[in-house]
């Protein structure tokens, strides 16, 4: 294949017919194939038949065992005496069962199996139908029952190359996955040998037996050793029985695969030809836990292409590596493509299967009239997920209602919110979307073709892969234009509901700018989307870009509002299936809202707002989900340079400069930032130092917010501003906070404050004392980062109490009985009264338009006089307006807690400004201690945080006073953020940036003095990416202009302000 699918201009038009013809016919020679493990020539992968795999298990006592089995059966009386010797001999010597079986089983068990086979043959004979012959034998030995023999044996009848939906063969491999492989670990792992009998069950019945032998691995007790290349020596981490059976060739092959698994992330796939044979050996290696249900899914894959396995092995190793080896052959007398071509497809699609092994759209059953190949089925799965989030669930009726109601009216807003929630829950369910896609296979195939015509990559000249069979199938279909596809959908869709779902897939096709769908190896599927398809009625501010990620055990998004943007990656955990379904419905909305809030907060730093969310399925390994999410997005950020592993992808965005993302910690990801930075480094990303913030200070030069109180410093500036403005003595002020002493914000708020804290809520429960909680005890917990469950209850006053989430029927000092601690904790923030409320933790929208009235007593008096939001999105916008109308002085999150984002922004700057050598010298701790440069840089950051927070507080307060309280502080904060963001966007693309004197003056002030003094401004301007310099310059100019000259400043004011910068 030598003709590229995509023209050099990267347009969205499909290729010309001649291009398609060349591509589909495969103009290159199929004699070479890239090995997904190393990208080398297939011809070097040819192996001699006598060295291909495993040594046959020696069993000198086999004849004696056969005699014993014959005697047992003869004595049993269940089989005619004259038939016993012949049936036993057939079983031992004609069926072709491997010696492993005879070594594993006792003579009594073997006798039972011979008898079962004989009985099944009799039953099939009486029914005059050989297909009725069914063997289903199994023996599972659980842990502890028979020491040293934990494992299982499964034997069933099996037709070569056929996936069945009924009978024993339909479930055995899925059960083996579930019982023995999906939860493997180096401390408890199993190996598998499975064989197809070489002989038929009888002279008149052609069916064969499939035997599976699962056994517990016995790993060496000594530490692993390394090879001369620095990789783990396979012999030092292997199961003893594997070492006995594996040939030298197999050990060499597995060693190479293991090296690749250790070296990089994701599956390693190798294919070998067997000398003088059409048999192919497929070897796949990956890290334990990297996927699930994979072994059974592979069978469906090769069956789809008319192949069957003679034998298969699953080996697991003490260093956490799993290797699957399969020997594949063509099923005789079928219309399937020749194995010389289909094996290439199996190799390519095994990577997709690794990402999504349990795909409801992939079926190879005989009764499936129109099965999808793996690529088409994977596309359908992705479309299924996309439609769940982006089918327009609101529509024109909602828009009309929205226009008719007044959203500033709390009652109207509540009605609108309830209708919106109900629409989202009821209009397009996951099941209804799946049913539509499964009932329109031809339309789904056309939509896949539409997608493939754009994103199928051009031929890699180094590997010269032939087009995959999935793509070759396109020559039997006429590619349709978008308009023709719309018309076809409207004609063919069963109803309007189905039409909208199928149109959602076409919308998806039109807005994918690049993806890793056709990357040879990957761990999850990622798509860079143009967000212009988002309906304005639901998402009024259009994001700059978004990523959509789909894995077998999670889904995720990343949304950003400017090219240079930064924000945290949040993992949303679900307590159960119902909670998970609810999280699915709100996932993208939460991501969008968090990114939009972040954008408002990032008003005076170079990076715009961004946010990433990951939603794992219930009980999934959240670290594994995070790693796959990050790796799949990195696939789209750095160009692939290794054919067969990471190849070039089609990018229709037209972008010339590289796209860079900056990730930060958020819920459940704080301890994963180091891995992400190191992983970007291992993939040779030049921006690895700045890829994540919140990294380990000692190991990777991160600047931790909690240790240096970065977020709390900005929150404190607002609290101090409130105290000063109202003439309050902090020690006399009563305060309530959510987020306990075990958290970042909560602990630092305790340590920095001197007030009378009356109540705290955290994950463990609530703590309350109207006389004020004992401050030394709170400080003790905050320094130790311990939750309030550890508070000494002896230090509570007579009216104080502690209620933990696991408590039941607790009696309070008032005599009130609390039946359930969790329920009490979840609503406790509505019971407390205090002068000041500082939310430092809690779920988004804990206070919303539906419940905010509970924060006002019967006399109309609010529970709090002042609110300074530390936590993100604790209040909804309508709830803020409601409280401000009641007289509460409220300062919203996007203004108050921006200290953390300022710190992270300057952490990114250090990573971009310092080269690798300088970074390792200046930012990484030596002997556990920071360098003088690091300490000075941290002080610069703290100073900038305080300056920015104080400047914004002053700006908001002056504007509120200018409007004489008629305009809410919430509105002023939003106006300030919007004005700054808009001005920054205008400045970033203006020719004012070309004024070199102003650029230098601004950058010298915007970049911390410690960094400028160390490197010099000229060096920094050479190193920082152009788009980043523009962002730094425009952010500083816009924020300092507005903070100094106010929101009502004129063009003349700006002229004078900028003139000073240019002098």
Image (spheres, rainbow, N blue to C red):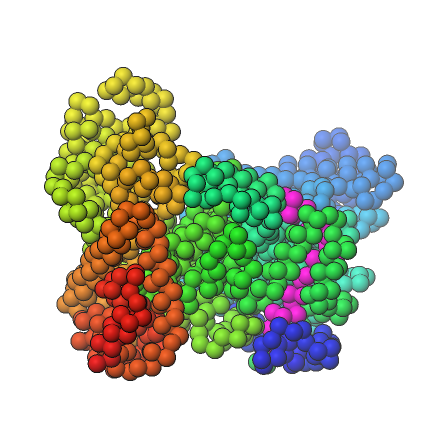
Q: Which residue is drawn at 27% across and 17% down?
A: 815
- Residue 348 drawn above or below residue 57: below
Residue 791, image x and y in percent? 21, 33
Whether residue 514 is visible to the viewer of this picture, yes or no, is yes
Quadrant occupied by the N terminus: bottom right
Most common secondary structure along the magenta stretch: helix
Quadrant occupied by the C terminus: bottom left
- Residue 192 drawn above or below residue 1063: above
Report if residue 432 lies within the magenta region. yes
Please state the extent of the stretch shown in magenta in the rendering.
430-459
Q: Which residue is drawn at 63% across and 70% down?
A: 454
Residue 616, image x and y in percent? 48, 48
Residue 517, image x and y in percent? 57, 64
- Residue 338 drawn above or below residue 860: below
- Relative placement, left or right, of 979 versus 86 is left
- Relative placement, left or right, of 814 versus 771 is right
Q: In which quadrant of the rendered view does residue 132 lie?
A: top right
> Camera-side residue: 1000 or 575?
1000
Report if residue 421 lies within the magenta region. no
Q: Which residue is drawn at 25% across and 19% down?
A: 814
Residue 167, image x and y in percent? 71, 41
- Relative placement, left or right, of 858 versus 721 is right
Among all residues in the image, which is located at the extreme right? 128
């Amino acid at each position: 294949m030598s003709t590229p699918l995509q023209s050099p201009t990267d347009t969205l038009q499909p290729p010309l017919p001649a291009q398609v013809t060349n591509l589909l016919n495969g103009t290159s020679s199929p004699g070479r194939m890239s090995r997904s493990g190393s990208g080398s020539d297939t011809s070097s992968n040819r192996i001699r038949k006598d060295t291909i795999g495993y040594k046959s298990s020696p069993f000198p006592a086999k004849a004696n065992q056969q005699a014993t089995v014959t005697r047992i059966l003869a004595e049993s009386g269940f089989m005619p005496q004259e038939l016993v010797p012949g049936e036993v001999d057939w079983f031992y010597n004609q069926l072709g069962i491997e010696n492993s079986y005879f070594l594993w089983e006792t003579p009594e068990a073997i006798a039972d199996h011979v008898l079962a086979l004989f009985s099944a043959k009799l039953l099939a004979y009486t029914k005059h139908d050989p297909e009725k012959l069914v063997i289903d034998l199994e023996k599972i030995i659980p842990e502890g029952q028979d020491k040293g023999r934990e494992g299982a044996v499964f034997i069933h009848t099996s037709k070569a190359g056929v996936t069945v939906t009924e009978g024993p063969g339909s479930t055995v491999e899925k059960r083996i996955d579930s019982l023995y492989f999906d939860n493997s670990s180096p401390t408890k792992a199993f190996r598998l040998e499975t064989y197809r009998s070489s002989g038929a069950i009888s002279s008149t019945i052609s069916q064969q037996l499939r035997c599976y032998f699962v056994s517990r691995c016995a790993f060496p007790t000594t530490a692993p050793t390394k090879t001369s290349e620095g990789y783990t020596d396979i012999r030092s981490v292997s199961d003893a029985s594997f070492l006995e059976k594996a040939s030298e060739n197999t050990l060499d092959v597995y060693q190479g695969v293991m090296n690749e698994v250790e070296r990089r992330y994701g599956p390693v796939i190798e294919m070998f030809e067997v000398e003088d044979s059409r048999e192919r050996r497929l070897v796949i290696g990956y890290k334990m836990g990297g996927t699930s249900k994979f072994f059974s899914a592979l069978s469906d894959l090769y069956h789809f292409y008319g192949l069957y396995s003679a034998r298969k092995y699953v080996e697991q190793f003490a260093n956490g590596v799993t290797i699957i080896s399969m020997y594949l052959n063509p099923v005789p007398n079928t219309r399937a493509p020749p194995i010389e071509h289909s094996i290439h497809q199996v190799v390519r699609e095994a990577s997709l299967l690794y990402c999504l092994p349990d795909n409801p759209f992939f079926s190879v059953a005989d009764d499936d009239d129109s099965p999808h190949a793996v690529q088409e089925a994977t596309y359908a799965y992705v479309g299924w997920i996309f439609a769940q989030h982006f089918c327009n669930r609101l529509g024109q009726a909602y828009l009309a209602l929205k226009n008719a109601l007044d959203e500033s009216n709390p009652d109207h807003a509540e009605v609108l919110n309830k209708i919106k929630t109900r629409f989202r829950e009821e209009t397009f369910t996951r099941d209804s979307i799946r049913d539509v896609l499964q009932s329109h296979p031809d339309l789904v195939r056309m939509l896949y073709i539409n997608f493939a015509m754009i994103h199928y990559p051009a031929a890699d000249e180094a590997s010269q892969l032939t087009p995959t069979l999935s793509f070759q199938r396109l020559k039997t279909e006429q590619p349709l234009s978008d308009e023709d596809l719309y018309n076809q959908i409207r004609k063919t869709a069963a109803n309007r509901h189905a039409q909208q779902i199928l149109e959602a897939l076409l919308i998806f096709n039109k807005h994918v700018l690049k993806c890793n769908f056709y990357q040879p190896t990957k761990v999850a599927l990622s798509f860079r989307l143009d967000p212009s398809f988002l309906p304005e009625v639901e998402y009024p501010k259009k994001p700059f870009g978004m990523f959509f990620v789909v894995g077998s055990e999670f889904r995720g998004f990343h949304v950003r509002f400017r090219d240079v943007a930064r924000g945290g990656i949040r993992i949303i955990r679900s307590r159960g299936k119902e909670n998970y379904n609810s999280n699915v419905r709100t996932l993208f909305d939460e991501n969008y809202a968090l990114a939009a809030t972040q954008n408002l907060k990032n008003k005076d730093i170079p990076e715009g707002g961004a946010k990433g969310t990951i939603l794992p399925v219930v009980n999934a390994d959240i670290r594994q989900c995070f790693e796959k999410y990050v790796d799949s997005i990195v696939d789209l950020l750095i160009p692939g340079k290794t054919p067969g592993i990471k190849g070039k992808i089609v990018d229709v965005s037209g972008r010339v400069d590289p796209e860079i993302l900056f990730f930060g910690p958020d819920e459940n990801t704080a301890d994963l930032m180091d891995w992400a930075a190191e992983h970007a480094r291992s993939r040779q990303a030049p921006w690895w130092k700045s890829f994540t913030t919140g990294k380990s200070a000692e190991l990777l030069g991160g600047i931790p917010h909690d240790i240096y109180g970065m977020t709390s410093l900005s929150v404190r500036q607002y609290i101090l501003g409130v105290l000063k403005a109202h003439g309050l003595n902090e020690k006399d002020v009563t305060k309530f906070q959510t987020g306990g002493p075990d958290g970042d914000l909560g602990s630092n708020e305790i340590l920095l404050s001197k007030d009378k804290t009356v109540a705290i809520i955290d994950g463990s429960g609530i703590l309350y004392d109207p006389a004020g909680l004992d401050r030394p005890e709170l400080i003790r917990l905050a320094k130790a980062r311990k939750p309030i469950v550890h508070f000494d209850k002896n230090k509570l006053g007579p009216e104080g109490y502690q209620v933990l989430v696991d408590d039941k029927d607790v009696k309070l000092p008032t005599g009130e009985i609390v039946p359930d601690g969790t329920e009490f904790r979840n609503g406790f923030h509505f019971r407390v009264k205090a002068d000041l409320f500082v939310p430092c933790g809690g779920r988004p929208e804990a206070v919303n338009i539906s419940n905010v009235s509970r924060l006002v007593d019967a006399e109309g008096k609010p529970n709090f006089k002042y609110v300074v939001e530390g936590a993100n999105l604790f209040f909804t916008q309508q709830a803020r307006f409601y409280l401000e109308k009641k007289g509460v002085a409220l300062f919203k999150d996007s203004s108050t807690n921006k200290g953390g984002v300022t710190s992270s922004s300057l952490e990114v700057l250090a990573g971009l400004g310092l080269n690798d050598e300088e970074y390792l010298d200046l930012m990484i701790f030596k002997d556990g201690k920071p360098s003088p440069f690091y300490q000075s840089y941290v002080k610069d950051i703290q100073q900038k945080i305080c300056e920015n927070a104080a400047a914004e507080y002053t700006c908001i307060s002056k504007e509120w006073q200018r409007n004489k309280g008629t305009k809410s502080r919430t509105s002023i904060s939003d106006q300030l953020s919007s004005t700054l963001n808009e001005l920054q966007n205008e400045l970033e693309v203006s020719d004012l940036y070309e004024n070199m004197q102003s650029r230098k003056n601004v950058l010298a002030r915007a970049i911390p003095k410690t960094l400028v003094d160390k490197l010099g401004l000229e060096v920094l301007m050479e190193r920082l990416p152009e788009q980043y310099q523009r962002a730094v310059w425009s952010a500083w100019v816009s924020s300092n202009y507005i903070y100094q000259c106010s929101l009502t400043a004129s063009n003349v004011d700006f002229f004078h302000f900028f003139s000073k910068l240019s002098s």
